[in-house]
Image: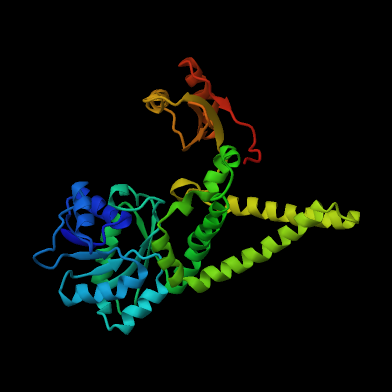
Amino acid sequence: MRSAAVVGTGLIGTSIALALSAKGVTVYLVDKEPVTALAAAAVGAGRAEEPAEAVDLAVLAVPPAELAATLAQAQKRGLARAYTDVASVKGRPMADIVDLGCDLTSFVGGHPMAGGERSGPLAARANLFEGRVWVLSPHPATSEWARQAVESMITTCGAYPLVMKPGEHDAAVGLVSHAPHVVASLMAARLEHAAELEIGLAGQGVRDVTRIAAGDPGLWLDVLSANAGTVADTLTELGRDLESVIKALRHLEAGGTEEASDRGAEEVLLDVLNRGVAGCEKLPNKHGAPKVSYVTLSVPVGDQPGELARLFADIGATGMNVEDVFIDHAPGKTAGVVELLVTPEVADLLAQSLKDRDRIAIEAPEPESTV
C-alpha cells in the first residue's frame, strides 16, 4: 500500500492514519470539520488535503448512520480504488449501502476492536491496534483485490483480521461492548448527585465499572440506535437477573420470615456472584492469551513529578516483565499505590529486587470487596 485517505479524523481514524504514516504510507486526511483534520495532521497523521488522484484505500471513519452516504459520495468522486469503514455496527449500515446502490465490489466492512473513552485526534496513537482483532464483514460481491487491500492495511496497523457475518458481529459486540457501555453509564449516572462524602470513598472498583461511561454520548447514541435490538435483548436478560437480585436483597433487608426463604435469597445472590466469576474467567488476558493467574505486588508511591518514571526504571533494571499495571490514588493524600501484575514465577524475585532498591513491594492478598 502506497497511499490512503482517512475520512473522519477522530480517535480511530487518526490512529489508523498515524499507524499507516509510520510505515511510509502517504495518508490524506479529510473531515467535515477542517480544523479537526488540521489537528490530526499536526500530530503527524498525514496531509490535511484531498488527494489529487485515487488512493489505494479509503478508510471511512464516520458514524454508522453516515456511512452509506459517505461511501456513495467518495465512490462518485473516485476517491480510492478500495474502501472500508470502522463502524462498530455492520448490519444496518450494509443494508443502507445496498439500498443506495453503492459499488459493493470495492467495499469491505470493517471494525477494529480497539478504542478508548477519550475521543478526537489528540487522543490518537499509532499503536492503538497492535495485537487486536479487526473484524471484516465483506459482502458476497466484494472483490478479492479489495479484501486484500484492507487486510494489508490491517496488518500494517499491527492487528489481525477476523471475518464475521454482519449479524454475527452485531450480536457479539452488543454483548461485549454496547450493552456494557449502557450498564456503565447507568452506574455512573448514580454518582451524578452523590454527596461529596460518598464520592470521597470511591475506590478503584467503581472507577473500573464506570470508566467507559466517559465516552462521547453523541457517538454512542448513534451506535446504540444502529444496534438497538441486540442491545435490548442483552439488557432484557440482565434485567431479569437484576429483578431476582433486588427481590432477594429486599427479602434479606426485611429479615425474612422463614429459614428456607432466607437460604433461597442467599442462594440467588451467590448464584449471580459465582456466574460473574465464571464469566470473568472466560475473558482472555492481554494479546488474547489464555487466562492465567497473576500475582499482584503493591508498591506505595508518592504523587510527585517523576515518581512513576523512577519506579518503572527500577522495574526495568530487574529485567523482569510486568503483565499489567494499575494505579490506585489515596483520597486526599499526595500518595498512592501502584499494583504490578506479574506471573507467579517472578513475583518473589521482583519483590526482592525492588526491596534491594529501597522500595516496598507487598504481595496482595486475594481480592476483597471494594467501594
Nearer-the-camera pick, 233 or 187: 187
Q: Position of residue 92 (x, y in %)?
A: 40, 76
Residue 168 drawn above or below residue 141:
above
Q: Position of residue 93 (x, y in %)?
A: 36, 74
Residue located farthest toward the right when viewing the structure as drawn? 258
Report the side of 266 relative to 365 (left or right). Answer: right
Q: Is residue 125 visible?
A: no
Q: Position of residue 29 (x, y in %)?
A: 19, 58
Residue 35 drawn above or below residue 144:
above
Report the side of 52 relative to 201 (left or right). Answer: left
Q: Which residue: 52% across, 68% down?
A: 231
Nearer-the-camera pick, 136 or 27: 27
Quarter of the picture containing the C terminus is top right
Quarter of the picture containing the N terminus is bottom left
Q: Is residue 283 visible?
A: yes
Report the side of 11 relative to 361 (left or right). Answer: left
Residue 141 drawn above or below residue 6:
below
Q: Position of residue 216 (x, y in %)?
A: 40, 57
Residue located farthest toward the left when viewing the structure as drawn? 52
The colour scheme of the drawn protein is rainbow
